[in-house]
């Protein structure tokens, strides 16, 4: 499982075309509440990394665009989203990766496999469980 060490490493991986979404790695351009809940819940079954600030080219579906954002408070925001949107709250490790100016950058959320998985998404009345199939989330049945 790739866990980046710096913003420069993230940018180099994107610029070289080395990043691919998989069952244990997903990248998102921005932080959206329901999507964070679904992605984290899905990752709890096997574990993985979610990387925020990297977008997908809509034509090629490859991770080719960098979208660094203001980091102030974003790790706490992700932790709050998980704490209020998923039942039972899973363990996560959000990590900021500031660029040279220290205000903008990327966030990786390390999600260890949970012995209590799957975890239910409860935000927006969803009440569903999610897992990963390849590079996509999928709804799991109640059983």
Image (cartoon, grey):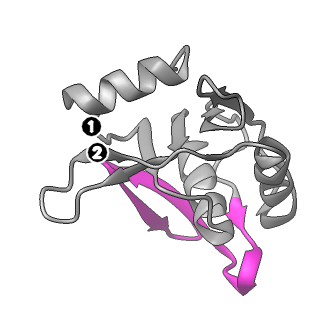
In which quadrant will I find the N terminus?
top left
Give the number of the disc on residue 63: 2
**Is residue 5 located in the magenta-colored stretch of the structure?**
no
Residue lying at 76% horizontally and 51% vertically, measured from the top left: 78
Residue lying at 60% horizontally and 22% vertically, measured from the top left: 100
Across and down, in percent, residue 76 comes to: 85, 45
Residue holding disc 1: 20
**Compared with residue 60, is residue 93 higher up or lower down, i.e. above or below?**
above
Front: mark 2 or 1: 2
In which quadrant will I find the C terminus?
bottom right
Q: Mark 1 falls on what kind of element?
A: loop
Q: Nearer the viewer, residue 7 or 95?
A: 7
Q: Quadrant of residue 120?
A: bottom right
Across and down, in percent, residue 129 comes to: 60, 65
- Residue 100 is at least partly visible in this image: yes
The answer to whether mark 2 and mark 1 are in CB contact below 8 A is yes
- Residue 1 is at least partly visible in this image: no
Residue lying at 55% horizontally and 17% vertically, measured from the top left: 6
Across and down, in percent, residue 98 comes to: 65, 28
**Compared with residue 139, is residue 63 higher up or lower down, i.e. above or below?**
above
Residue found at the far front of this picture: 101
Across and down, in percent, residue 132 comes to: 42, 51
Q: Mark 2 falls on what kind of element?
A: strand
Classify mark 2: residues with Cα within 10 Å, few (<14), some (14-19) or many (20+): many
Q: Which residues are magenta?
A: 120-143
């Amino acid at each position: 499982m790739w866990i980046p060490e710096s913003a420069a490493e993230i940018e180099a991986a994107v610029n070289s075309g080395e990043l691919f979404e998989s069952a244990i790695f997903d990248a998102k351009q921005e932080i959206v509440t329901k999507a964070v809940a679904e992605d984290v819940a899905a990752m709890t079954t096997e574990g993985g990394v979610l990387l925020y600030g990297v977008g997908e080219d809509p034509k090629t579906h490859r991770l080719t665009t960098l979208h660094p954002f203001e980091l102030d408070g974003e790790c706490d925001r992700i932790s709050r989203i998980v704490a209020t949107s998923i039942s039972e709250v899973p363990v996560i490790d959000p990590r900021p990766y500031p660029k040279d100016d220290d205000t903008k950058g990327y966030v990786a959320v390390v999600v260890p496999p949970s012995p209590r998985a799957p975890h239910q998404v409860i935000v927006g009345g969803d009440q569903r469980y999610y897992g990963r199939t390849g590079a996509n989330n999928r709804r799991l049945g109640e059983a």
